Image (cartoon, grey):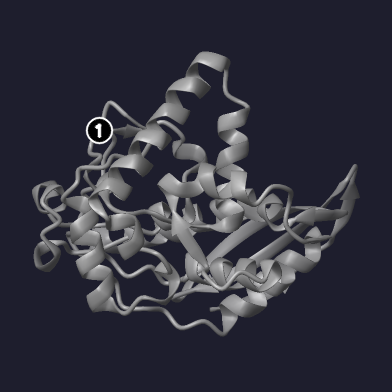
């Protein structure tokens, strides 16, 4: 993966724009980068990474379709939304801000779902199992995921088996693409879940950058713990000019290894 060229930048109010051509797994991706010009917390670049992730996912889907394997993930299939979803601290702050900005009644419903999910996980003892998500070996992650999944804890944003925040869903959710039957996801039947390799480890790379900037040892927390974590860590994280965040992210990404796909988020 490498950046082939970067074209003319121009100031536009408080943002900078740049056209970039990124090569990922032999596929050229054209990106129009809109970056905050001033000092911002790291979560301010998440919209850019969401767009980048979508472009990579489209390439993965096209390539899979050409080999006769269609992506099984569809609206209305929320099986993976009962797995333990790891989010970065920056994403936790973004999600907390999203909930805070909801209309009062909707906000109350979502906050109640978060509280219920956390309580259920704590009562079952699976919260402690899944602390330190970023540094788990595959065996521990598998056992923790199975224990969590067995509790049937739905993502607080899951409504009618569909993601109610799909445009701004976490990075890891965007990288979870399977070609196997949904029935295997519904049972978290790991050996029979065929997850496609995601050729740009965006989530892992962003987690490293976020952890480094915040000084936090754990790169990821459970999504259901996002509101609680933010309440315990008030205030924004470290601020830097937007272009510096983006430059460091792509530099880190260019040296990152692509992990083997796991049937678990």
- Residue 157 visible, this angle: no
Q: In this view, does 70 lie to the left or right of 108?
A: left
Question: Is residue 3 among what the camera can see?
Answer: yes
Categorize mark 1 by other alpha carbons within 10 Å: few (<14), some (14-19), many (20+). Answer: few
Q: Report the residue at 28% width, 56% height from top.
A: 126
Position in image of residue 234 (x %, y %):
69, 47
Query: In the picture shown, does residue 237 fall above or below 198?
Result: above
**Where is residue 139 shown, x and y percent of the image?**
22, 77
How many tags in the picture? 1
The quarter of the rendered structure image containing the C terminus is bottom left
Residue 43, above or below 4: above
Q: Which residue is drawn at 42% across and 76% down?
A: 135
Q: Name the residue under label 1.
A: 76
131 sits left or right of 52 in the view? left
- Give x and y (percent) for residue 232: 61, 49
Q: Is residue 203 above or below residue 151?
A: below
**Residue 140 % position (x, y):** 26, 74
Identify the residue at horizontal 35%, vertical 61% (top origin). Answer: 128
User: Is 220 situated left or right of 65 in this image?
Assistant: right
Residue at 61% x, 30% y is 100
Badge 1 marks a residue whose secondary structure is loop
């Amino acid at each position: 993966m490498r950046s082939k060229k970067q074209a003319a930048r121009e100031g536009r109010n408080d943002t900078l724009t740049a056209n970039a051509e990124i090569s990922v797994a032999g596929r050229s991706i054209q990106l129009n980068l809109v970056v905050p010009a001033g000092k911002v917390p790291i979560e301010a670049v998440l919209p850019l990474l969401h767009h980048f992730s979508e472009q990579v996912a489209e390439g993965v889907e096209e390539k899979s379709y050409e080999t006769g394997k269609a992506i099984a993930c569809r609206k209305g299939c929320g099986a993976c939304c009962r797995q333990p979803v790891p989010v970065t601290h920056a994403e936790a702050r973004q999600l907390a801000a999203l909930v805070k900005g909801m209309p009062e009644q909707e906000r109350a419903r979502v906050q109640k779902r978060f509280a219920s999910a956390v309580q259920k996980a704590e009562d079952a003892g699976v919260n402690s199992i899944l602390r330190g998500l970023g540094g788990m070996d595959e065996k521990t992650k598998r056992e923790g995921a199975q224990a969590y999944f067995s509790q049937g804890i739905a993502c607080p944003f899951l409504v009618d088996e569909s993601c109610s925040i799909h445009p701004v869903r976490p990075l890891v959710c965007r990288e979870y693409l399977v070609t196997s039957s949904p029935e295997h996801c519904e049972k978290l039947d790991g050996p029979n879940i065929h997850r496609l390799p995601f050729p740009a480890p965006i989530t892992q790379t962003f987690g490293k950058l976020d952890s480094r900037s915040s000084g936090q040892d754990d790169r990821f927390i459970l999504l259901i713990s996002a509101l609680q974590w933010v309440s315990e860590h008030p205030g924004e994280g470290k601020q830097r000019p937007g272009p510096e965040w983006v430059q460091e992210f792509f530099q880190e990404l260019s040296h990152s290894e692509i992990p083997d796909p796991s049937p678990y988020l």
